[in-house]
Amino acid sequence: DTAVSQTPKYLVTQMGNDKSIKCEQNLGHDTMYWYKQDSKKFLKIMFSYNNKELIINETVPNRFSPKSPDKAHLNLHINSLELGDSAVYFCASSQGVSPDLANYGYTFGSGTRLTVV
Amino acid sequence: QKEVEQDPGPLSVPEGAIVSLNCTYSNSAFQYFMWYRQYSRKGPELLMYTYSSGNKEDGRFTAQVDKSSKYISLFIRDSQPSDSATYLCAMILYNQGGKLIFGQGTELSVKP
């Protein structure tokens, strides 16, 4: 049983298209995240939801819109895709946002490799 | 200047070597420190965490934190080819919504 699963694993699309990435976790965690990893492996937070409420919204173009229908799901919709959006997008989850986070850490999905051509 | 600096490598060592991976950080408010391991085309997985200055050992891995120097290290003893991966340090501020700040990651290759 995959703890944090993302779909699709690979996404190749043309500039200007709109695409969505889906994430589901079966760990019973109440917090979910989207991270972006660029070509240099630098991992940066984009958004965080705690019990369906947006709690972190980093400086991300408003073409990116997260949606959390329930605490087990967090989706990412991207409008008008640009070449610079090419990256690996990771979903993650954790139980809360307290120091226990350091104890158990996040659980990451395997990533969605987005290529914009 | 990034909040967390980490040499991206790549670092190549022979099997059995002791590996030292390091990160420096600028924000003295960071309270919790973690090391993640990321295999190719996989998500990062938590390797070790610590929140106080000093050493913490887990098998072949030792995490070291020096808050006065804003410097953290991960040592891998008797390195194995299966340790070949990217190692990312990560830090967290209390009450920041669980936001992890990552270093760039160091790519490690252990040659048989």
Image (cartoon, rainbow, N blue to C red):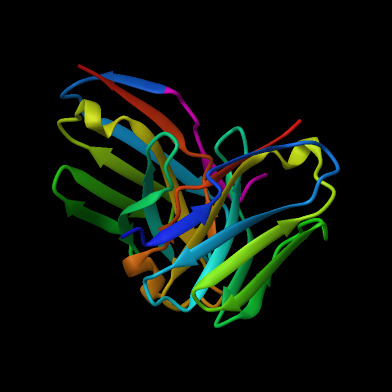
Let me know if residue B59 is in the magenta part. no
Could you say where residue A99 lies in the image, as x and y percent from the top left? Answer: 41, 75
Side of A51 where B36 appears, left or right: left
Drawn side of residue A3 relative to residue B79, left or right: right
Q: Which residue is pictured at 32% across the width and 68% down the height?
A: A103
Rendered-image quadrant of the C terminus of chain B: top left
Q: Quadrant of the N terminus of chain B?
A: top right
Is A114 placed left or right of B84 in the picture? right
What x and y, as percent, mark residue B79? 20, 30
Q: Main secondary structure of the magenta part?
A: loop
- The answer, for residue B70, to whether it is visible in the render is no
User: Percent position (x, y) of residue A13?
Assistant: 73, 38
x 61%, y 33%: residue: A39
Image: magenta residue range: B1-10
Quarter holding residue B86? top left
Closest to the observer, A34 or B110: A34
